[in-house]
Image: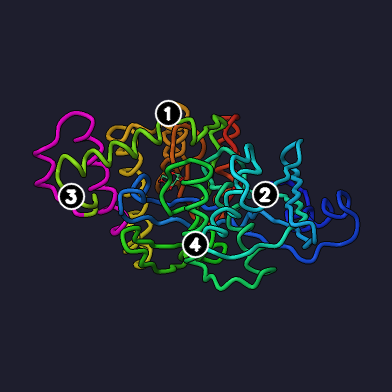
Amino acid sequence: MTGGSKEPAEIRAQQLFEARYGGVPDGISSAPGRVNLIGDHTDYAGGLVLPAALRVQTAVAYRVTDKGRVQATSESFPDDSGFEPGELGVAGWGGYLAGVAWALLESGVPLSGLELAICSDVPTGAGLSSSAALEVAMARVWREVDGLALDDVALAKLCKRAENDYVGVPSGIMDQFASSVPEPGEVLLLDCFDLGYEVLAVPAGWSFVVVDSGASRSLAGSAYAVRVAECAQIADVLGLTSLRELQTENLRNLTGDLLKRARHILTENQRVEAAAASLQLKDRPRFGRLMNESHRSLRDEYEVSSPALDTLVKASLSFEGCYGARLTGAGFGGCTVQLLETGAEEAFAEYLQKHLPQAKIVAAV
Ligand code: GLA
């Protein structure tokens, strides 16, 4: 849905490669963005999440070179990036690629030098994990060309390491896992405590649409790190090794912001379990109600919503045929996800155009 009438990312990456380097690439790897259906700000607290892999992808066309360096060009950024695998401190968008190289080298594998051309249909800065899609697509390139023995789960963990320890964002594992493990269009029920997971299908007749509020966000510069620190503080105050052990009784020993944050974590994990069950039972009204409760909790208890997101959620719920709506991802701007009946997407898009023209449907599952 993103990219309008443009060719898909894989085709554009091939064309960009040929224009930039001449000749043809050895291959093209890609990885999808994700939309989280329910379970936000629970992954780094050892909780449950229910994301779906999007059909829009980031594609990396690659060719092995004997120069040992990585040279990368991207359709989305004016400047190219170049680095030696293992080089520290690579800034800007190339940092995601250099971070993946660094994490792979740390795990003891030698890496080939590469020429790369990157194109993406995953909207950036919207909370749809464009960075995880880039990391996973990049790790898939090295897995392929250097024959690395990494399964999809190991690859997700490695990409998380790149994001946390190289790029410097203290995120959980949801995004990299959702980009690496399920097929596009599939839903992932992931237990971030032990990485146990199940892949689920979206029931026939259900349609999740992703709407960009038009207010972009920056995860690295946001209050995200403050929330991660608050969770560590809660565990500390309560003497828990993981917030997964949090029980209703523990709430008595908390006050102020920490009490609110803990209430969100506790109830959001319960909602994810209930939502996964509703998906399997094909109970759409219940799934929608859980989405609405999740949004309220993220807004009032976890305080990661924004006026634009709240307006969009409220407006969506006045559309007849919208079962539920919530912010998705880190919040502080970016996107919402809405549950509709299949076939209602066009009328919903027209409704948004009329009431909130800055809001746009950017993806669907
Ligand atoms: C971002 C992070 C994820 C997760 C979400 C909120 O997308 O990268 O790890 O914490 O925010 O659920």
The label nearer to you, 4 versus 3, is: 3
For label 2, being within 8 Å of ligand 1 is answered no
The label nearer to you, 1 versus 4, is: 1
The residue type indicated by label 1 comes to Ser
Q: Please tell me which of labels 4 and 3 falls first in the chain.
A: 4
The residues bearing labels 2 and 3 have C-alpha atoms spaced at a distance of: 41 Å
Q: Residues within 10 Å of mark 1 (few under 14, many from 20)?
A: some
Quadrant that contains the C terminus: bottom right
Q: Which sits in the foreground, 119 or 289?
A: 119
Please, is residue 206 above or below residue 170 in the view? below
Tags 1 and 4 touching, CB below 8 Å: no
What x and y, as percent, mark residue 257? 23, 30
The label nearer to you, 4 versus 2, is: 2
For the question of whether residue 171 can be seen, the reply is yes
Considering the numbered disc 1 on the image, is that residue within a helix, a strand or a loop? Answer: loop
- In screen coordinates, is 11 left or right of 139? right
Q: Please tell me which of labels 4 and 2 falls first in the chain.
A: 2
Q: Give the labeled residue for mark 2.
A: 121
Q: Give the labeled residue for mark 3.
A: 240
Q: Give the labeled residue for mark 4.
A: 205
> Which stretch did the figure color magenta?
245-274
Q: Which sits in the foreground, 131 or 82?
A: 82
Tags 4 and 2 touching, CB below 8 Å: no
The residues bearing labels 1 and 3 have C-alpha atoms spaced at a distance of: 31 Å
Does the magenta segment cover residue 139?
no
